[in-house]
Amino acid sequence: MSDDLPDDSKLTRTKAKWAAEGRFLTGRQSRAEEERLPPGQHLVKNWPVLDLGIEPPIDLRAWRLDVDGLVDTKLRLNWDGFNALPQIEHTSDIHCVTSWSRYDNRWTGVSTQELAMHAGIKPEVKFALLTSNDGYTTNVPLADFLVDDALLATHWEGEPLTAEHGGPMRLVIPHLYFWKSPKWLRRIEFSASDQPGFWEERGYHNYGDPWREQRYS
């Protein structure tokens, strides 16, 4: 769980300080359909690596994804079972809360809608609570988890997702700041109630809309 993560790491201390200071905030808001680059963001060509300093070793033979909570059928997928699900491809932008954005990232993986259909979400579900193999946690409203271009990505630009970027599989929800798209995803819990995750408990916004500049709480 998030309590086991390094609260005294340099990145954690720095980002918590940014939240307290309101770093990168411009006070300007825009709409995604009008402006592609959200307020306070700058474009990059590379893909910066940001995490909590823990890159968990993952053996594909032991890899699992648990889908549970308020569902009709709890799932425990191994790597072969996950990859046997229908595959989709989407191209979307990344917007990181640390102020960089990268356009036109081509992802391949399994649609979040496909996974939810297999589990059978109960009517009272309002949130998806997400846990990674490094213990990182975050929370996403169900409606955002199930948008058409959200997917559980295994490939980027036609190549398997590297470990430093969350491989073998990470979540991608393009319309939210990228801390809402956890690397190394291990568990999806569908819940009727919200539960803030690692960064949400440390001064970051509970929703994280880049165009409304929801960086911090």
Image (cartoon, rainbow, N blue to C red):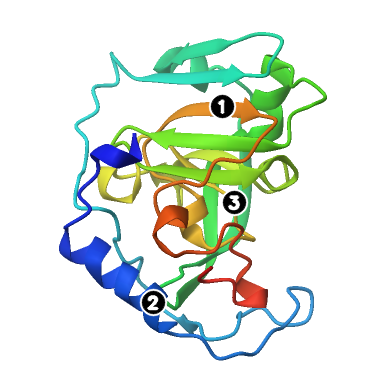
For marks 3 and 1 on the same chain, the one whose residue lies earlier in the sequence: 3
Which residue is more in the foreground, 124 or 117?
124
In which image quadrant can residue 194 be found? Answer: top right
Hey, what amino acid is under mark 3? Ile
Dot 2 lies on which element? helix
Residues at marks 3 and 1, CA–CA distance in whole angstroms = 16 Å
Q: Tell me which residue sits at (66%, 42%) in the image.
A: 145
- What residue is disc 1 on? 189
Q: From the viewer's perspective, is residue 59 above or below residue 5?
A: above
Dot 1 lies on which element? strand
Q: Tell me which residue sits at (52%, 71%) in the image.
A: 215
For marks 3 and 2 on the same chain, the one whose residue lies earlier in the sequence: 2
Nearer the observer, disc 3 or disc 2? 2
Query: Counting other residues with Cα less than 10 Å from the Cα at mark 3, is it few (<14), some (14-19), or many (20 or more)?
Result: many
Dot 3 lies on which element? loop
Hey, what amino acid is under mark 1? Glu
Which residue is more in the foreground, 139 or 96?
139
Query: Counting other residues with Cα less than 10 Å from the Cα at mark 1, is it few (<14), some (14-19), or many (20 or more)?
Result: some
- What residue is disc 3 on? 173
Query: Counting other residues with Cα less than 10 Å from the Cα at mark 2, is it few (<14), some (14-19), or many (20 or more)?
Result: some
Q: Tell me which residue sits at (34%, 41%) in the image.
A: 2
Report the disc number at residue 20. 2
